[in-house]
Image: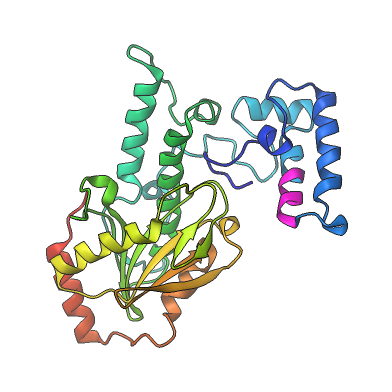
Amino acid sequence: MPDSPISATPYEVLGVSASASTEELRRAYRRLLRETHPDTGGNAARFHSVQLAWERIGTPQARAAWDRGRPSGRNEESHTPWASSAASRPRDSRPLARSYGHPGGWRRERFLTLMREWAGRGVTLDDPFDPALVRTAPRDIRHVLADALAEESTARTLSSLGIAYTVWHDVRTDAAGGGPEMKLDHIVLGPTGLFALLSEDWGGPVRVRKGDLIGEVLGDERPMNGLSLRARSVARAARVRFTALVIVVPDDASEESLAVMGKSRGVPTVLVQRSRLADLLRSGLDGAPAIAGTELFELRTRLQAAVRFV
C-alpha cells in the first residue's frame, strides 16, 4: 500500500470495518493470507498488501497510531506526511535542472478549498492534511491531494536530471474545456527530446488498451486523450513538436514499467512507472532524434515566451 491519500486503507484491504474487533481483524488476516498466497495460486501483489495492512493495524499499538493518522512502522514518517510540498524538500549540491512553476501548487490549493467546503462554514481545520481527517473526506477530494503529491514526486525526479534539462510545471493550456483542470503537469526539454507529462495517482491499477489507459479506477476517463489535447494546445502556441506524451504513475499502478501505447497524431504516447522516469528521459525513446545545442536553445526560447502557468 503506497503512502497515498487515495489508496485503500488497511481496513479496506482486509475487508473489515474500522470498528472491527481484534479477533475479527485476525480472522480476516488469516483468511486472506491463505487466499492470496502465491504458492496456492494467489496474487503476489495482493498478498503483499495484506501483510502490509496487518503490520499497520495488527497490534493495538499500531492500530491506535494508524487511527490517529500517525503510522508507527519503522519506515513511516512521524510527522504529517502530506503537508510539505516539493519546494520545501532539502536539495543536494549537484547542479539541478532549470525549473519554472510550482509543481502540485494548483492542486494543493484546490484540495484546501474543497476540504474547507466539505467541512462546512464556520468549521476550523487545524490541519487539513492530517491523514486521519483526509481519510474521512470524499474520494474526489482525496484524489486531488493524491495527484498533487504525484506531481511533487515527479518534480523531484525531474530536478535530478541535471542542468542540461529545463522543466516547466503547472502549465496552462487552451485545451477544450479550458480552466486549470486542463493544465499540463510538466514539460521537460533536454538533449533526448521535448516531453509533455501528466503525473497521476488513481489509487488502483491501470493497463494499456487501444492506445489509452483503462481500469476500474478510471471509469470513463481517457487520460491519454486528455494529455494529447493539452500538449497540442501548447505545441501550437509555442510552435514546437513534442517528442513524446508521457503519463507517470506509481510503480504499483502498472505491471509494465514502461509501455509505448501508440501514437497521437504521430507523437508516441508512453506509460511509465515513476521509478523508470529518469531513465526514460535520460535515454530517450528508441528512434527519437537527439536535440543539438542550437535547436535546444531555440526550443527553450520559444517555450519561455509561450508558457503560462495556472
Q: In the rendered image of this protein, does residue 244 appear above or below residue 199?
A: below
Q: Can residue 1 be seen in this view?
A: yes
Q: Which residue: 29% across, 50% down? A: 102
Q: Can residue 92 be seen in this view?
A: no
Give the magenta range.
44-50
Q: Nearer the viewer, residue 168 or 17?
A: 17
Rendering coords of residue 217 (x, y %):
52, 47
Rendering coords of residue 34 (x, y %):
86, 46
Q: In the rendered image of this protein, does residue 284 appear above or below residue 176?
A: below
Determine the image quadrant of residue 123: top left
Determine the image quadrant of residue 83: top left
Q: Which residue: 32% across, 36% down? A: 110
Residue sitting farthest toward the top: 122
Q: Nearer the viewer, residue 279 or 110?
A: 110
Q: Which residue: 35% across, 60% down? A: 225
Residue 284 belongs to the span the image colors magenta = no
Q: Nearer the viewer, residue 130 or 287?
A: 287
